């Protein structure tokens, strides 16, 4: 596929920019370089344990330069999805207190008795009581939706996708109605609205084939799979545009301009003897 020049680069977080809260080498430098360039950037995570405000604070604490608009999470895409599907305001939120409070800040109400749907998030505060309530809703026929589909979060930790399997076992044949995060379309809608950029002008950088790379491929973005020391995963039917050993290599060797993916920043180098594409 022939792409127009890229205008927005998106980074997955867990396993891509950091692991267990520790940044991979040269990530600060990479974000600083982007800050100085014409390319917009976004932090795009499926992780729904915390809301976008908490992510902003977390990334800031890690020393990354950013504004609030740079953070795009599955929690925001979840609200868009729920409104579009007309679920709510009362829903059962199977997630952390922070996830619940973000949804409540957006007008949703956590309810067991009157839940119109079961929303499955990455619940690191899961209890037997919550599982029982959610199971009863599924058995009673409540529609199931999820913030994202990942079965395992890098760590590794059991994630929302594992809970979806649990509910599929609870009621064989049950269908998950909709999922908000990568690789689904709600995030694309959010990105287009916020950055005014088409998917063909986006670059998706991530460590997961089935979420990050599939997301990019499905919507026609360029994609960069970063291994960061992990073994090369099975690609199946997915073809990343590029596979890179370490995220830090994006600072130089795989800098978008150096790949010919973006307009060179200075007009003076257009058509220079290095023969860069303009
Ligand atoms: Mg990841």
Image (cartoon, rainbow, N blue to C red):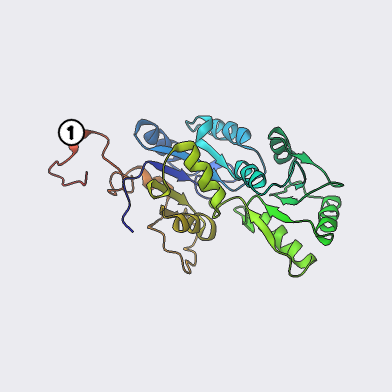
Q: Position of residue 23 (x, y in %)?
A: 51, 41
Q: Is residue 117 shown left or right of residue 262?
A: right
Q: Quadrant of the N terminus?
A: bottom left
Q: Position of residue 20 (x, y in %)?
A: 60, 46
Q: Quadrant of the C terminus?
A: top left
Asked whether mark 1 and ligand 1 are closer than 8 Å, the reply comes as no
Residue at the farthest left position: 273
User: How many numbered discs?
Assistant: 1
Q: Is residue 27 visible?
A: yes
Q: Is residue 168 shown left or right of residue 61?
A: right
Q: Residue at x 35, y 45 (%)?
A: 6
Question: Which of the 4 quarters of the picture holds residue 152?
Answer: bottom right
**Which residue is more in the foreground, 25 or 39?**
39
**Which residue is more in the foreground, 125 or 198?**
198
Q: Is residue 159 visible?
A: no
Q: Position of residue 3 (x, y in %)?
A: 33, 52
Dot 1 alpha-carbon crowd within 10 angstroms: few under 14, some 14 to 19, many 20 or more: few
Q: Position of residue 146 (x, y in %)?
A: 67, 52
Q: Residue at x 74, y 56 (%)?
A: 143
Q: Residue at x 66, y 40 (%)?
A: 50
Q: Is residue 127 shown left or right of residue 269?
A: right
Q: Which secondary structure, mark 1?
A: helix
**Which residue is more in the foreground, 124 or 265?**
265
Query: Which residue, given by chain and number where applicable, does mark 1 sit on?
Result: 268
Q: Is residue 238 shown left or right of residue 79?
A: left
């Amino acid at each position: 596929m022939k792409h127009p020049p890229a205008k927005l680069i998106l980074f997955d977080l867990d396993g891509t920019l950091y692991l267990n809260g520790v940044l991979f080498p040269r990530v600060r430098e990479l974000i600083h370089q982007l800050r100085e360039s014409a390319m917009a950037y976004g932090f795009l995570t499926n992780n729904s344990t915390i809301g976008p405000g908490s992510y902003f604070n977390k990334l800031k604490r890690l020393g990354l330069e950013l504004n609030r608009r740079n953070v795009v999470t599955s929690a925001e895409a979840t609200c868009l999805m729920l409104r579009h599907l007309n679920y709510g305001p009362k829903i059962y939120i199977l997630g952390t207190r922070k996830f619940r409070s973000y949804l409540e800040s957006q007008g949703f109400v956590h309810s067991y008795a009157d839940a119109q749907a079961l929303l499955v998030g990455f619940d690191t505060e899961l209890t037997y009581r919550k599982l029982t309530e959610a199971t009863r809703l599924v058995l009673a026929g409540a529609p199931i939706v999820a913030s994202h589909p990942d079965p395992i979060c890098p760590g590794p930790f059991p994630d929302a996708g594992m809970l979806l399997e649990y509910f599929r076992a609870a009621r064989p044949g049950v269908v998950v109605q909709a999922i908000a995060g990568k690789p689904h379309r709600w995030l694309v809608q959010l990105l287009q609205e916020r950055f005014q950029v088409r998917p063909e002008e986006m670059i998706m950088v991530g460590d997961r084939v089935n979420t990050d790379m599939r997301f990019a491929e499905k919507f026609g973005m360029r994609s960069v799979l970063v291994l960061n020391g992990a073994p090369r995963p099975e690609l199946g039917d997915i073809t990343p545009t590029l596979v890179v050993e370490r995220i830090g290599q994006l600072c130089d060797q795989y800098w978008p301009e150096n790949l010919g993916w973006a307009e060179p920043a200075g007009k003076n180098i257009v058509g220079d003897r290095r023969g860069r594409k303009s």
